Every structure is written in C-alpha cells, then in structure tokens.
Amino acid sequence: MRSLAFVMFLAVSAWGQTTAYQAAAACGSRDTTFDVTEVAQSAPAQPDPSKALVYFIQDDSPGGGHQHYTVRIGVDGAWVGAYKHNSYFTVSVEPGEHHVCANVQSKSSAGLNLALAHFTAEPGKVYYFRTQFLAGLNTQYPIYPYLALDRPDSDQALYMIATYPVSQSHHTP
C-alpha cells in the first residue's frame, strides 16, 4: 500500500511539473526583463495582408492601482514586448495557432503570476488581447493582484487604443 501511495505521489508530482512547464512554454525566458517607455498615440496599425496583427493592451482601469507593474507578453515561447500603465503595442504574426503568455516582470513571487491564452490567426485579420489586474483573486499569492488576460470586444479595444499611448519596450541586459 505504501508503495502504491508513493508511486501515485510521484506521478501526480511529475504531471504537475509537466503541466506547468507546458503552460509556461508560451512565455519566454524567465530571466528576460524589459525597460518600458510610452510614446504619443498613433493611428491604428493595419495588418500586412499575409499576416495577422495582434494588439496587446494593458488596461489598468480608472483607479490605476497597479501601474508600477511591468507586464511582459510572450508569443509561442518568445517575449515580444512589455508594457505598464494604460498602454498598448502591436505584433505581426504568421497565420496559424499561437499561444500567448502575460507575466508580471518581477524577481519576487509576483513574477509567477501569469495568464495564458491561445488563438488561431488568419491572414489580414486583427486580434485584441487585454491584460488587467484584478485585486484579491490571486489564491496562490494573495498579497499580489491577479493578472487577467482576455479578448475585449473590438469596439472597446479601439476605444482604448485611441485613448492610451503606445508602449515601447527594450530588453535590459
């Protein structure tokens, strides 16, 4: 009986590690960090006809209580940019299935706070993803806000894009 319990413990532990690893495969290297600046708004970008355009929008709500957090965005295992405050940036992607990761950039346990999504891109189409911090819903690290990743309605996304500045991010050494 003890042997069976031990084998089940190992199997559950291995499954948990594999699942976490697979989920984080949408992200980039944990050691990558970004410096973020914001620039004036620009006209909405148009997609290349052979690719899809993805907008990533940080919506810190009117209260803006979590503006000091930098959120980095990964697509298919590579970080593609970062932002903070109410801002956005765009990325062009090839048609096909893509996996998205949003992660709080931090050396503390807040860096483990991530959100995941996937989508299938079609050429010439535009996609919108929004990150928000929701206070009090993070059960793993209750002192940190919960990072949510969703797909807002295109009208809401276009409103935010017209209102928010563009985020420019650069890898830090």
Image (cartoon, grey):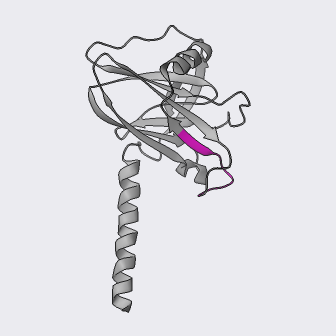
Along the line of sight, the residue nearer the viewer: 79 or 142: 142
Residue drawn at the location 59% of the way across and 58% of the way down: 140
Q: Which residues are magenta?
A: 140-148
- Would you place residue 63 above or below residue 17 in this image? above
- Would you place residue 43 above or below residue 116 in this image? above
* Residue 132 horizontal/vertical position (percent): 59, 35
Residue drawn at the location 64% of the way across and 42% of the way down: 134
Residue drawn at the location 28% of the way across and 23% of the way down: 122
The tally of labels here is: 0
Please identify the quarter of the rendering in which residue 38 is found.
Answer: top right
Q: Is 142 covered by the magenta stretch? A: yes
Can residue 57 be seen in this snapshot? yes
* Residue 159 horizontal/vertical position (percent): 57, 16
* Residue 37 horizontal/vertical position (percent): 59, 23
Residue drawn at the location 42% of the way across and 45% of the way down: 29
Q: Residue furthest top?
A: 43
Quarter of the rendering occupied by the N terminus: bottom left
Q: Is 10 covered by the magenta stretch? A: no
Can residue 173 be seen in this snapshot? no
Query: Does 138 sit left or right of 129 as displayed?
Result: right
The secondary structure that most of the magenta stretch takes on is loop
* Residue 162 horizontal/vertical position (percent): 57, 12
- Would you place residue 2 above or below residue 102 in this image? below
Along the line of sight, the residue nearer the viewer: 32 or 41: 41
